[in-house]
Image (spheres, rainbow, N blue to C red):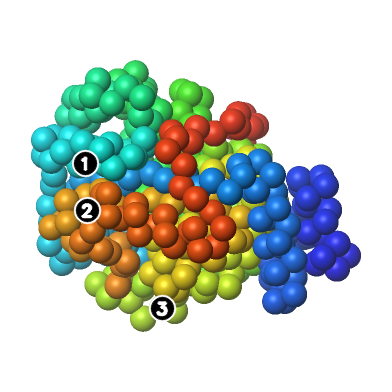
Amino acid sequence: MTNIELIQTLNQQKHLTFEQWTQLIGTFTEREQAYAADLAREISLARFGNKIFFRGIIEFTNYCKNDCLYCGIRRSSGASRYRLSKEDILLSCEDGYRAGFRTFVLQGGEDPWFSDERMEEIVKAIREGYPDCAITLSLGERSRESYQRLFDAGADRYLLRHETADKQHYESLHPPEISFENRMRCLYDLRDIGYQTGCGMMVGTPGQRPEHLARDMLFMCGFRPQMIGTGPFLPHHDTPFAKEPGGTVKQTLYLLSLIRILLPWVLLPATTALGTIDPKGRERGILAGANVLMPNLSPPGVRKKYELYDNKLCTGDEAAESLRILRERICQIGYDLTVDRGDSPMTGGQKREYPR
């Protein structure tokens, strides 16, 4: 089958074989990418209209106990460390709420200082203060009991990128104490508890091949996450991957389109990383099928310290100004921001089946 025929089959059947995915991802042309983007955009418009959901990210700690080989806030990096207080976090929520945000994303490194008790207190305070808002957590790997406590405290969603669904490739990106099996355990625990669960992979990581990305697509097809965060790998100067080439805009946009065709109702961000390597990256992501943007609500003084990769897109704009600028930019391509929690209509997929 040609790649155009494979894209048509994907649209009709919502499934491809491993060999078909490998071909489709490994051999595409600009014409095939444009075909996929047009189809993905039609699918997104049919389900969500021209409305783009926006979520406010609060990067509340850049301490991390892990030493992942690609990450700029890894334990052994020379990052200038910070933690936001509960009061700082609530002030960021207040600023965001006044500006129109109805989803808050608490994102941080795996910082043991933020124990279950501290996080439970923070989540409860946000839930009590903003009952009409969604609370999304992105805190990395924790125990099932921890996830349950935070869910019971009022969290709605959890973002945890699987990063790669190939075990050997996963191990090449992480130190030995971080296991592929535990990452998968976390994702299934989150979904089983009842979170709207997000996974996702980095595009263009060192050693990544089309076969790895084919496994990602098969995993996501079976897992059926409500959200998928996919952006290009970008190197950081203070990591073992400092000299490695980054992922490309072209491949990232193509994969966004294929994900939209595979999972029409998924919430799919055009990531900050995409906007970092291309000034129009987020707009191009929307035109490739994305339907979520995630502006930064962190206090301006700490935004540059949460540097997962070099040259991260970062402005000092206040919440309202950031939204105004974003709205102007996406209006130019025929879209608008919607003041909505933006909950996913999707339900979870297969029971626990770890890809190999």
Using the image, determine if residue 32 lies above or below residue 354. Answer: below
Sequence-earlier tag: 3 or 2: 3
Using the image, determine if residue 345 lies above or below residue 285. Answer: above
Q: Where is residue 149 in the image (x, y as percent from the top left)?
A: 31, 21
Kindly check if marks 1 and 2 are in contact, taking CB atoms under 8 A apart as contact: yes
Using the image, determine if residue 198 lies above or below residue 286. Answer: above
Q: Which mark is residue 195?
A: none
Q: Residue 244 carries which label?
A: 3
Residues under labels 1 and 2: Cα distance?
8 Å
Residues under labels 3 and 2: Cα distance?
34 Å
The mark lying in front, picked from 1 and 3, is 1
Q: Where is residue 86 in the image (x, y as percent from the top left)?
A: 13, 35
Q: In percent of the image, x 38 and y 44: which residue is there? A: 55
Q: In percent of the image, x 36 and y 24: which residue is there? A: 132
Q: Which mark is residue 95?
A: 1
- Identify the secondary structure beneath mark 1: helix
Q: Which of 168 and 339 is in front in this view?
A: 339
Q: Which of 317 and 8 is in front in this view?
A: 317
Counting other residues with Cα less than 10 Å from the Cα at mark 2, is it few (<14), some (14-19), or many (20 or more)?
Answer: some
Q: Position of residue 259 (x, y in %)?
A: 63, 52
Q: In percent of the image, x 31 and y 47: which residue is there? A: 57
Residues under labels 1 and 3: Cα distance?
38 Å
Q: Is residue 21 visible?
A: yes
Residue type, numbered disc 2: Glu
Q: In percent of the image, x 42 and y 46: which residue is there? A: 54
The mark lying in front, picked from 3 and 2, is 2
Residue type, numbered disc 1: Asp
Q: Residue 318 carries which label?
A: 2
Using the image, determine if residue 202 lies above or below residue 183. Answer: below
Residue type, numbered disc 3: Glu
